[in-house]
Image: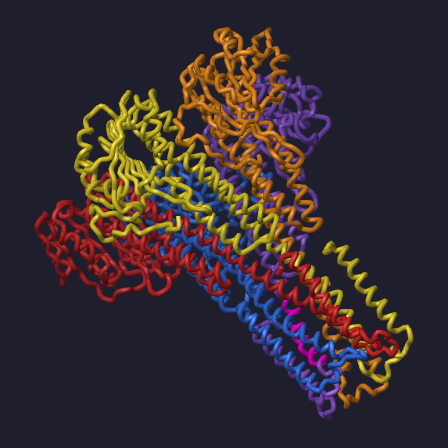
Chain colours: A purple, B blue, C red, D yellow, E orange
Amino acid sequence: MSESLCTSSGKSGLPPGSLIHVGEVLEPVGSISIVDYSKGKFEEKKLQSIDEIIQYKDSDTVTWVIIEGLTNVEIVERIGAIFGIHQLVLEDILNTNQRPKFEEYDDHLYIVLKCLLPGGENFTVNNEQISLLVLKNFLIMFKEKKDEVFHPIRQRIKTSSGKFVSLGSDYLAYAILDFIIDQNFILLDLLDESITSLEDSLFEGEPTQDMLYKIQRLKREMISIRRYVSPVRELLAEMIRSESDLIHENTHIFLKDVSDHSIRVVESIESYRDILTGLLDIYVSSVSNKMNQIMKVLTVFTSIFIPLTFIAGIYGMNFEYMPELKWKWAYPLTWAVFIIIPLVLLAFFKRKKWL
Amino acid sequence: MSESLCTSSGKSGLPPGSLIHVGEVLEPVGSISIVDYSKGKFEEKKLQSIDEIIQYKDSDTVTWVIIEGLTNVEIVERIGAIFGIHQLVLEDILNTNQRPKFEEYDDHLYIVLKCLLPGGENFTVNNEQISLLVLKNFLIMFKEKKDEVFHPIRQRIKTSSGKFVSLGSDYLAYAILDFIIDQNFILLDLLDESITSLEDSLFEGEPTQDMLYKIQRLKREMISIRRYVSPVRELLAEMIRSESDLIHENTHIFLKDVSDHSIRVVESIESYRDILTGLLDIYVSSVSNKMNQIMKVLTVFTSIFIPLTFIAGIYGMNFEYMPELKWKWAYPLTWAVFIIIPLVLLAFFKRKKWL
Amino acid sequence: MSESLCTSSGKSGLPPGSLIHVGEVLEPVGSISIVDYSKGKFEEKKLQSIDEIIQYKDSDTVTWVIIEGLTNVEIVERIGAIFGIHQLVLEDILNTNQRPKFEEYDDHLYIVLKCLLPGGENFTVNNEQISLLVLKNFLIMFKEKKDEVFHPIRQRIKTSSGKFVSLGSDYLAYAILDFIIDQNFILLDLLDESITSLEDSLFEGEPTQDMLYKIQRLKREMISIRRYVSPVRELLAEMIRSESDLIHENTHIFLKDVSDHSIRVVESIESYRDILTGLLDIYVSSVSNKMNQIMKVLTVFTSIFIPLTFIAGIYGMNFEYMPELKWKWAYPLTWAVFIIIPLVLLAFFKRKKWL
Amino acid sequence: MSESLCTSSGKSGLPPGSLIHVGEVLEPVGSISIVDYSKGKFEEKKLQSIDEIIQYKDSDTVTWVIIEGLTNVEIVERIGAIFGIHQLVLEDILNTNQRPKFEEYDDHLYIVLKCLLPGGENFTVNNEQISLLVLKNFLIMFKEKKDEVFHPIRQRIKTSSGKFVSLGSDYLAYAILDFIIDQNFILLDLLDESITSLEDSLFEGEPTQDMLYKIQRLKREMISIRRYVSPVRELLAEMIRSESDLIHENTHIFLKDVSDHSIRVVESIESYRDILTGLLDIYVSSVSNKMNQIMKVLTVFTSIFIPLTFIAGIYGMNFEYMPELKWKWAYPLTWAVFIIIPLVLLAFFKRKKWL
Amino acid sequence: MSESLCTSSGKSGLPPGSLIHVGEVLEPVGSISIVDYSKGKFEEKKLQSIDEIIQYKDSDTVTWVIIEGLTNVEIVERIGAIFGIHQLVLEDILNTNQRPKFEEYDDHLYIVLKCLLPGGENFTVNNEQISLLVLKNFLIMFKEKKDEVFHPIRQRIKTSSGKFVSLGSDYLAYAILDFIIDQNFILLDLLDESITSLEDSLFEGEPTQDMLYKIQRLKREMISIRRYVSPVRELLAEMIRSESDLIHENTHIFLKDVSDHSIRVVESIESYRDILTGLLDIYVSSVSNKMNQIMKVLTVFTSIFIPLTFIAGIYGMNFEYMPELKWKWAYPLTWAVFIIIPLVLLAFFKRKKWL
């Protein structure tokens, strides 16, 4: 999530309704594949042309079309033509800066949200926008990247013999949403780890500028995650409230379950935010604490040696009439003073608990 | 509550609907016991097989089934089959990372929440997920651990002759909820103690790194507690609003009473949060205060002795023509200066209130 | 309010419905007194036994029963029996850790709230739980302590010839609520005084550890007050919404007036909270400011004398070939340097505005 | 607004319903004046006795009665008697610690709010409570002080030939509310000025204790202003919702306009609050920044001269066998060291960007 | 946005209903131009007199009137007369301190909001108030400045052959709103850049007073932006809810799309606020961190050389009986001490990780 939090729609001034891909290009060429299944049937294949999906349009089987890469605008345009999708929806599919939302149309539903996956070594987050068009026995999914993220779902369809294959495209949509939201828990576990390791190194070692940098970076990541996840609750609530025929009665309970998960995710994020804010306070306190210790060392050193140096200075003066200079025991006596003063001061600092 | 705040559902990718235990295993083997009671009857026994409960299914007595340990998935599966429980509910029972919630079905209610108990020596909190299935004259409770936490309720049923035994499974559910929420007060009392002791040691002694650590730990604990307790208000509100036949009219007043308690718990937590936040501010202020004192000591010492050392240095110079060196009263006069300068400076610092 | 913010209900495990006094015992023996009045009639007396009130039960006069001290559980039990009060209400009366609330029953209303009175010398707050049972022409008040707090109301009844004595028990309840809430304004005035005096001493004098302690204590007190007062708004809103016959139409406008007062109290508390939070920030800033001044003194002293001492040190060296040592004007010249360097540095510090 | 934020109602214990003036006395003697107008008629005069207004009671003209000073309780009492005003409203008029509110009665409306005017030299705010009784063709205004604040409105009535004089008392009430709320913008402009000047002096000069004091004072003022203005939104919303005959259909759009203004005021206050909070943070940061600079000066001075002094000290030692003392170039070499060491250190500090 | 956050309505005391321009004058002379279009027709011209628009009033084409500069009050007055606009709307058009809002009248809609454009070199924002009067086939736009901001829309109308020209004035209003809101994304991208560059220079270099100034300035800008943008959500929600005939059914989906954008803008602003607040905390922590480093240097230098200077001072004393002075190896031994002490101290500081 190195990208900025907000990205201009990039088409200001363009007529709303002109289809162009807006957003970072993550996949130069698009690919189309389908999964077609029903009780006892499972077919998986790559399509060369988008027009091949027409044959599945009126079949009884559930067809899951997966389009990876959004630069090929014609695919989206063609789908719009085949299924009669509103121009604005097509635009939203192509613009990868969408806020998660659910839209209900007469004969299709549009769902868009972000799939968040852990990135590289440090705590970085990759996000990919997933658009779902839910039609009767048909689900078209638009992804930015070509990868195997949703492989486990395909696997489940393949191996399932019961519920999954006997339920419609709404259950498939649920399964995808459930999968995407469950990914967040993995992220949050990583976040937890990062925070805990920061906390530990803060309490054990020195507070460094680097930690500060990490705290700020985690904060930014969390702010992004929240912005992507927080509207999902709403999205799901609207789906549950929806009276569309495309969502069957018995899918509601499943959606309610995902909704519970999304609430848990958001509540966790809020908790981590609190903890992270606390961590910065702890950091500042730690720095102050260290400063105190440094100051104590300085003060103890200075306070002990400065008076002694002064005394040595006195008897380094060259006045002619300094009777002490001639006393036999003057020098040992001076040493006695050199020993007593530090002891007194050390006792004083001890009582002040500076040592 | 050493666990992380959020834990991945652990089954991402698994078909929703596959029953496996998700969460830390707290009890390797499961055990089943029942308490069967009605006016004038009280029976308590351990069951060998879950199928033994079928005989109680249609009796007039209230039957409380207690299942301890969730690793034995077959028990949960069997109960699902016997009583016709939805697959998702069974999954939720087995997944111990649930957000407290209340779900209403045609012939049963599902309640899940966390029972929080004080842990070891410091302020640590152990949590256990309690799931309740409320059916007509039947209450099935799922616990993660095998312990005697709910012994007092069993005792009350045994000794009660009036209300308890004459009311149904909803009153039993109420009694359990009431018990679980009242445990929180004990926790909060311990929390109060911890905070007060921190506060005292902060105002009396030195601010140490260790206190910082304790404050952060208490904060984290409180964030967890709030996450477990806060949704309970909602849960109870939904129960009160529920129009299920399983909750009798005269149980409502009891539920309202528990609801009041849960609100009090949440309000207390919020108050403690405020106090804890304040404590960190106080900590930072304390550290700054100490620093001021250290700096004052340093400044007073340095400011007094540095000029004196300089004067001693002057008359330690070896110029040939330094007339003062030969004056008879030079040395005593220098001493006079050595005494007057500190006195003046001390007076100055006194007026500045640094001493 | 030295007590903790939350106190365990203390009966966890006990059957809900067992009547025992929960909370600090403020009054060892209970006492019962009544005020019976109607237009032209005023009777005030102490009762020996609670059963004496039965004779007033069906009279046309308004009867105000005052029960002071809650340890004598039988009194409460007997009243429950005489007037048919729900067991849970009786429990709530005896448990002095209640959240302010209003409950409506068929033939009686139950109101519980805290009466806050300023305590001793510093800003401390004493609270007492007041429970009111409002019946037709009957008001039973339960207090924890035996004192004369409500004397002014008794006086008003005695001297009133008009409205008070011609209205029912709901007006009496209103008068009591109004009185209790108006006590809060006295508290808030004291709070204002405490804060202002803290503010003044902060801007004038030195920031001390003691102030920090006072700020934290005030904060805690305010958190408690808010917890006791905040739910009163709700309580009154529910009373106003209530359609019980026990609250006459023309009492509503009076209740709305008290409700306005309670809103004012809560808003004041919020404002003071903001001010107190600001005060802590000011404190921290003040401490930093002082530190700056201390550092300036140290820096000025050190920066001036350290170079001088170094110069004196140079001519205190014992090299054989140090031609300056023999120059006639060397010593006066050195003195010139001793005077010029500080002047230059002082000018420099002056320009930096450190002096 | 040097007064405290909350002021005791001052009559705790007094029967609600006893009319006495509560609040600071701003005007010792009261005065009554009226403005009577209709299309083509404008009369303005001072009344000696409140009873003179009776003659205007049933006229068709709109009569605006202005009562300045609230100590003369009989005036309020008499108005209550003449127009049948509820006892509690009369009390509220006399108590100048009211929260802004709108109350609707059968044949009159009661509006109370604060008129905020800039005070003296610094940013101080004077507030005056304005009570309005709106009756059919009659508006009675109660002010605390005798001044010419509302002169502009009188002028507008006098010079208006169209809308104003042809509309009723509700339009007059609107004009007064509009006027009072627009005063707040003047205040906010002053506040803006104060904050900007503080900000400037903070970024340019030194952070002083005095600025801290000003920030805190502005904060307090803003808290007061918000408390007085914030409920006005509600007041206006209730007026707009009101179905009273006294507010004509075509006055609604005007009230909506004032309501917009009041929202703008409150939003501005919130923005300034944010800015002021930010200012304190900036202050603290500035102080820390300065401290850094002071410390740098101290460190640079000390680090340079302390090693030199040590070296000078070495050759001030009186050991018999110190060969360097006899070397011819020893002294010039020492001087070379005295010059090289500072140069090296200065280069080091330069690289650290401390100079 | 150098202007203050709130600006007095500037007409306090003036009769509401007197038309004068309130606000900064950005354009001394006004100009009127129109764009008249329908399917296959496009006309663009400058008008000399406002009365020329009457001829377009009842045509079937959509007419977009653009009035630039608000000082020519007669134009606004005349439009009010021609189209029967309410006096208060005309006032709002002329007062450029409006809060964004939507008002619905019988035969026209009034929309006012701010168009925010990036200003000069640094992150500065220019705002211009845009008022829209939407009538049947007619849209009158009032701008403060004469510029080409809306040129792209004109272009789109010119080149469009399909939807745009076949839809009414409500679609034109939508296109304008969409355009204005999309401008905000450009602003937010600039804001993001500014924040990131600040963040980078904070983590890499020194925290300077100048950064503090920039942070505060960004904060103020963001507070202004939020105040201008935040009410737009509401405005759009009201437009969508509106049942006016002037907004066609099929425009709703477009408005919903803009509404989504405006929500995204506000959420981004909130996120940036969080980040900016975090930045200030980071700043303070950085300053403290630097201070720690400075203190370490000071402490290390002082602690090493002060004891050495003291030792040198001892043997600079002039006592007659100082046996060490005569020892042959005294001087080399002293040097050994001069070397060992620093090494020991350096090891100590190394272990403390100060070096």
> Looking at the image, can residue C255 be seen?
no
Which residue is drawn at the image coordinates 41% and 34% (left, top)?
Answer: D182
Which residue is drawn at the image coordinates 25% and 51% (left, top)?
Answer: D11
Residue A141 quadrant:
top right
The quadrant in which the C terminus of chain C is found is bottom right
Q: Residue furthest right?
A: D328
Percent coordinates x, y for residue C81 in the rendering: 18, 53
Residue C247 quadrant:
top left
Percent coordinates x, y for residue B315 in the rendering: 74, 79
Highlighted range, magenta: A295-313
Check the image and report above or below for A88 versus A322: above
Check the image and report above or below for B352 versus B340: above
Residue E14 quadrant:
top left
Percent coordinates x, y for residue B120 in the rendering: 50, 63
Nearer to us in this view, A92 or C89: A92
Nearer to us in this view, D244 or B86: D244
Check the image and report above or below for D218 versus A107: below
- Magenta span has E102? no
Q: Residue furthest left?
A: C40
- Magenta span has A301? yes
